[in-house]
Amino acid sequence: EDILQVYRELTDIRGQIEQIEGRLRYLSNQAGLSTITISLTPDALYQPVQIAGWQPTGVAKEALQSLIFALQGVGNVVIWGVVFLLPMGVVLLIPVVVLALLIRWGWRRYQTRRQKKAAQANA
């Protein structure tokens, strides 16, 4: 009976080995049939470094690009100023003006009362 059990275990292990070997052969065949495709494209922003020679056209092109970039920045600031900051300034300025007028009115009223009291004290 022990021999039969050992024989069954051995048969089971052989089956597992054959199954693993079959899987290994399958994967090996699949790897042999596989292809890898690589496409390399140069980046347009990266240009080769030129060591010798001065190129005024290249310098002029860079200067023009910088000028355009700077003018775009100025345009962005103007647009932000007109669209956002000007209305916000008006909205925030109204309470400040009202407060300043109230303080001015109160100060004048205080000065007028003080002058009347001083005039009454002198009379």
Image (cartoon, rainbow, N blue to C red):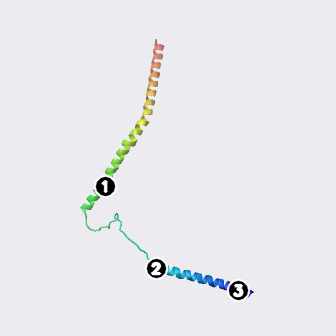
Name the kind of residue labelled 2 in the image.
Leu
Q: Which mark is residue 75?
A: none
Q: Residues within 10 Å of mark 3 (few under 14, many from 20)?
A: few
Residue occupied by mark 2: 33
Q: In this orientation, which residue lies closer to the viewer: 5 or 60?
A: 5
**Percent x, y of residue 85:** 40, 41
Identify whether 79 is placed above or below 20.
above
Residue occupied by mark 3: 6
* Quarter of the figure with the N terminus: bottom right
Q: Residue at x 27, y 68 (%)?
A: 52
- C-alpha distance separating marks 3 and 2: 41 Å
Q: Which mark is residue 66?
A: 1
- C-alpha distance separating marks 3 and 1: 84 Å
Q: Residues within 10 Å of mark 1 (few under 14, many from 20)?
A: few
Disc 1, SS: helix
Q: Residue at x 44, y 30 (%)?
A: 98
Q: Residue at x 69, y 84 (%)?
A: 8
Q: Residue at x 45, y 15 (%)?
A: 119
